[in-house]
């Protein structure tokens, strides 16, 4: 049974993003916050005694150190692959509404996890995150990935909610000239104005939030965005937290492309051959009854 309406699917393919709505209750969100707090304490106090996946160790300070990795006194910028260390977060990546929506948007029957991450913007910290798109940071062969951005706190422009550039995923002016915009992945080129492929590729990287569309979310709500959709988050200028659980999915059959991102933290220790299928225990099938249950 489809999770999304045809209108929602068409809107996503047109705009490159979809504000979906609530997928978790207030109690479920509180479970995730509490679990995040527990893991932060563990990383701060017992890091040397806890075995973690290599990618999980990146993006935050460990063991109470200050200034480590350029994060100063901050406990966390991001945790990569929470699903590997927390059963609570592992359940969320299998959430039937989320995974059902992803399959609808990809028009596939089977999807896998690429990776997840918790991203934190504490009060008055974490400056504007520049306008970017994700695909070319990943060692994957085709731009078919879709991200679920799940709010763990109310997210609005003042504390750094997502901002997107509608239609930028299909506009060749904002993509590298050799970008694969193929009809079989629902990305037939649709220029939004004059210009050649790649002509605004560098300009859009300098865009600020006022040049994009804000996507405010309540805690427990989510949005989806395509891996070629340009997006950014402004600085958190409030007294409130802005934490999000970000889950990136890929179609089953996606292959490894070493040259595109040879040092990605999720693959640089796996010894994958170029062109290898992204499969196995590090990239599990999600949303199937045998793979897990929803939180």
Image (cartoon, rainbow, N blue to C red):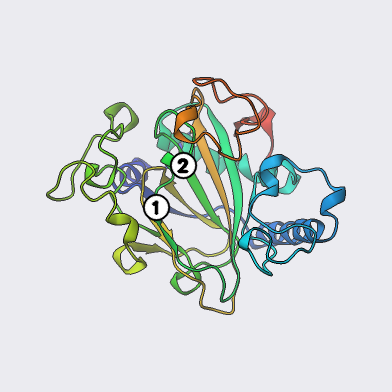
Q: Is residue 85 above or below residue 27?
A: above
User: Residue at image x 40%, y 48%?
Assistant: 133
Mark 2 burial class by Cα count in 10 Å: few <14, some 14-19, many 20+: some
Secondary element under disc 1, as helix, strand or loop, is strand
Vertical placement of residue 286 versus 200, above or below: above
Instruction: Specify which label sits upstream in the sequence, 2 or 1.
Output: 1
* Image location (x, y in percent) of residue 160: 48, 67
Residue lying at the far left in this picture: please name it.
194
The foreground one among 81 and 178 is 178
| Between 87 and 84, the one nearer to me in the picture | 84
Circle 2/circle 1 CB separation < 8 Å: yes
Residue in the picture at 14% in, 50% down: 193
Tell me the distance, in whole angstroms, between the alpha carbons under discs 2 and 1: 10 Å
Determine whether, in the image, residue 133 is placed left or right of residue 60: left
Is residue 295 in sight in this rendering?
no
How many labels, in total? 2
Task: Give the labeled residue for mark 1.
Answer: 132
Is 39 in front, or is 55?
Answer: 55
Judge whether residue 43 can be spotted in this image: yes
Q: In the image, which disc is placed on residue 283?
A: none
Residue at the spot x=66%, y=42% of the render?
Answer: 55
| Relative horizontal placement of residue 113, taking residue 130 as reference (left or right) | right
Q: Which residue is mark 2?
A: 137
Residue 260, how many percent across, how many down?
A: 44, 33
Q: Position of residue 172 (x, y in %)?
A: 23, 42
User: Is residue 225 shown left or right of residue 81?
Assistant: left
Q: Quadrant of residue 292?
A: top right
Q: Position of residue 289 (x, y in %)?
A: 66, 30
Residue at the limit of the structure toward the bottom, as seen here: 239
């Amino acid at each position: 049974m489809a999770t999304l309406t045809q209108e929602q699917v068409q809107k996503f393919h047109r705009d490159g993003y979809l504000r979906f709505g609530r997928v978790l209750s207030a109690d479920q969100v509180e479970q995730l916050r509490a679990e995040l707090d527990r893991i932060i304490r563990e990383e701060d106090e017992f890091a040397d005694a806890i075995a973690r996946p290599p990618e999980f160790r990146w993006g935050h300070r460990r063991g109470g150190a200050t200034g480590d990795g350029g994060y100063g006194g901050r406990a966390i910028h991001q945790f990569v692959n929470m699903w590997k260390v927390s059963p609570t977060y592992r359940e969320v990546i299998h959430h039937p509404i989320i995974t059902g929506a992803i399959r609808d948007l990809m028009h596939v029957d089977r999807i896998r996890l690429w990776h997840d991450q918790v991203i934190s913007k504490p009060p008055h910290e974490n400056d504007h995150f520049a306008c970017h798109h994700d695909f070319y940071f990943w060692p994957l062969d085709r731009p078919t990935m879709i991200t679920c951005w799940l709010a763990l706190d109310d997210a609005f422009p003042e504390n750094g909610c997502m901002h997107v550039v509608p239609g930028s995923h299909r506009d060749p002016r904002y993509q590298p000239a050799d970008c694969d915009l193929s009809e079989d992945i629902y990305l037939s080129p649709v220029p939004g104005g004059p210009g050649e492929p790649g002509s605004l590729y560098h300009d859009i990287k300098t865009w600020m939030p006022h040049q994009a569309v804000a996507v405010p979310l309540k805690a427990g709500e989510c949005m989806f965005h395509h891996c070629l959709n340009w997006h950014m988050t402004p600085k958190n200028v409030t007294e409130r937290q802005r934490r999000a659980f970000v889950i990136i999915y890929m179609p089953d059959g996606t292959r490894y492309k070493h040259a595109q991102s040879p040092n990605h933290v999720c693959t640089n220790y796996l010894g994958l051959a170029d062109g290898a299928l992204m499969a196995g225990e590090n990239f599990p099938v999600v949303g199937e009854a045998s793979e897990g249950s929803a939180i």
